[in-house]
Amino acid sequence: MNYFQKMKGSGQSPPKVGVVEILWSWIGSFLGIAAVAITHYKMLDETGLMMIIGSFGASAVLIYGAVRSPLAQPRNLLGGHILSAIIGVTAFQWLGGTPWLAAAVAVSTSIAVMHLTKTLHPPGGATALIAVIGGQNVHNLGYLYVLMPAALGAIVMLIVALIVNNIPKSRKYPEYWY
Amino acid sequence: MKEKHTGDFIPLDISEHDVIEAMKHIDGYIDITPGDFKEVYQAAYDMAIRRLFNSLTAERIMTKSVLSLKQEMTLVEAAHLLAEKRISGGPVVNLDGVVVGVVSEKDFLQEMGFGATPSFMQIATHCLNSKSCMIGRLHNRTVGDIMTKPPVTAGLEMAIGAISALFAKAKINRLPIVDDDGRPLGIVTRTDLAHSFNALGEGPLS
């Protein structure tokens, strides 16, 4: 297959999931995001602390919408967010004077580290990027960003996933822990 | 005997459509493309076949009570012995007990002048038309005279995959299994091989 033939794509897409599956994805993600958002807006709003970041929306797709995926397992969810947060904060602190470089280094390095540690979790890339481009509120947190929101938020969403994803007969979560 | 077209054998294949249909039977979003799944499946299937073919060795499938014929034995004696034991052939040993050839019905028939693969009806027709029945040619000859030599033999460790390949390549029906000194330990016949493949299909041997 030559270079341009590859671009056409020769495979087929997987089938659509059933209505029940879609409903449970909705319920899980509603509750998961609600849990971190309520903490954020009702309890931490005035403190300067954060509990929610954009990458949690992406995590919700995986841990409530693609429960079986290796990318959605606890090792990946927690490992991906925590490692990427460390890399993101470090990239900002070392290279923050050149934002474009800090942003690129943060994302690319977190992908490499997640691969190396078998914790690939796509939202981790966003967690690293937000550490750089998230603005003053994020920058003020320093390495606290790793523990909160990244680690703590991921843990709360994981707990909701464990509770909700094991209710329907057709689902079980996780496939494996680590 | 009809010639076998081993090249026509088509290994079990699944299509992307099969994979998609199977995925529909599983609840939840499966995070793999049908094409990738097919690739994984085929590689895993090949590994499983290879593992099965390498897991069963001659030692486990051979017939152990092998009847060896002595090189000096006359054909009449040998025919008596084979008839009595109801077997169609076996390894031939020299005075030291080392396998030096293999003798089978085929060798007898060839010696009688029927060619390598006559049918029973050819022989019957011939014998009905001539009183001598050509069997006379077998007098005063020994097993050593007509045996197939050098013998194709194998050790205990040869796996069934390799054995079946050897059967096809050397065009043989029985394979004496010998120790390091060439003394017979057992024999693997096509029947043994067929049983072993059947057993693989049924699951692990006890």
Image (cartoon, coloured by chain):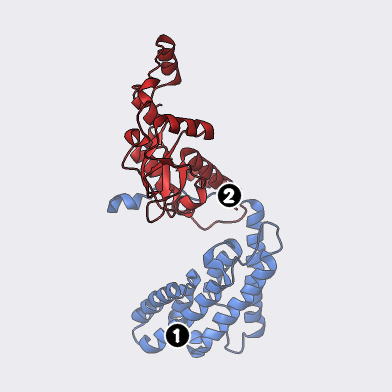
Visible residue check, residue A113: yes
Q: Is residue B158 above or below residue A144?
A: above
Q: Between marks 1 and 2, how big is the CA–CA gap?
A: 55 Å
Which subunit holds the residue at mark 2? Answer: B
Observer-nearest of B51 and A162: B51
Residue A36 position (above or below residue B60): below
Depth check: B60 or A72 in front? Answer: B60
Q: Which image quadrant for residue B165? A: top left
Horizontal and vertical percent for residue A131?
Answer: 46, 82
The residue depicted at 32 percent of the width and 34 percent of the height is: B145
Label at residue B203: 2
- The numbered disc on residue A12 is none
In the image, the chain rendered in red is B
In this rendering, does residue B3 appear at all? no
Q: Secondary structure at mark 2?
A: loop
Q: Secondary structure at mark 1?
A: helix
Residue at image location 43% in from the left, 72% down from the top: A115
Residue A81 shown left or right of residue A97 in the figure: right
Crowd band around label 1 with a 10 angstrom C-alpha radius: few (<14), some (14–19), many (20+): many
Tell me, for residue A89, which label it has, or none. 1
Residue nearest the observer in this picture, A66 or B108: B108
Q: Colour of chain A?
A: blue
Determine contact: label 1, label 2, CB under 8 Å: no
Q: With respect to residue A160, does B188 lie above or below?
A: above
**Which mark is nearer the camera, 1 or 2?**
2
Amino acid type for the residue under numbered disc 2:
Gly
